[in-house]
Image: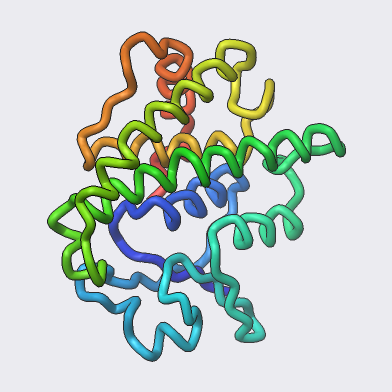
Amino acid sequence: MKIIYDKARAPNPRRVRIFLAEKGIEIPVEHIDLGALEHKSEAFAALNPMRRLPVLVLDDGTPIAESIAICRYFEAVQPEPALFGRHPKQIALIEMWQRRMELHLLAAIQNVFRHSHPAMKAMEPVQIPEWSEVNRPRVTEALAVLDAQLGRHRFVAGDDYSVADITALVAVDFMKPVKIGVPPEMTNVLRWHAEVSTRPSAKAQ
């Protein structure tokens, strides 16, 4: 099997890289150059008609796209360490916080990036600067929710590191290119970010 993603630290491919590193799984890689718009080619569209990264291709040729779908595949293949939870309550809480981090934090940051960063002009059909500005306060709102949660728990979805932490870490790190910082009063987020950033998986390439 192989996983296809670009050389840059794009958020979604990085989520899968961190997940695989936590699992101790190594698989062959084929790099796709986003800058050269290789993901827009017809050859790549045959694997993922959405033309997004990453894509996992199984031994039988089945392509699996979407970061969390890929992570769930590997969770089923290798259950330990459990990153999606072990029992019904924990599984549900991790799913809830993973979706919150993905839909309310990471998505808002991506909207700021896609509609304001010069590098995205060639990739977005139309950049809408106003949409970028609409999403900036949404980032802070999501961080405030995360900060409150981390005031009660060591990790995003409770006391165990999970896929929710991976999504949140990637999101917070992706704030840098759009020049959004974690407010200094959000000490719980800062504490958590410092801790999860020291995990070897955070440096997965």
Q: How many marks?
A: 0
For the point 24% across and 54% down, the residue is 115
**Which corner quadrant holds the N terminus?**
bottom right
67 is higher (above) or lower (below) than 146: below
Colour scheme of the picture: rainbow
For the point 59% across and 19% down, the residue is 149
Q: Quadrant of residue 36?
A: bottom left
Q: Quadrant of residue 178?
A: top left
Which is more toward the observer, 138 or 205? 138
For the point 29% across and 78% down, the residue is 38
Give residue 191's position: percent from left, percent from top: 45, 14
Question: In the drawing, does residue 110 fall left or right of residue 196?
Answer: left
Give residue 61's position: percent from left, percent from top: 61, 85
Question: In the drawing, does residue 186 fall left or right of residue 75?
Answer: left
Identify the residue at the far left of this view.
118
Give residue 26's position: percent from left, percent from top: 54, 58
Question: In the drawing, does residue 116 fall left or right of residue 163?
Answer: left
Give residue 163's position: percent from left, percent from top: 60, 41
45 is higher (above) or lower (below) than 86: below
Which is more toward the observer, 27 or 161? 161
Which is more toward the observer, 46 or 111? 111
Identify the residue at the far right of this view.
88
For the point 41% across and 76% down, the residue is 51
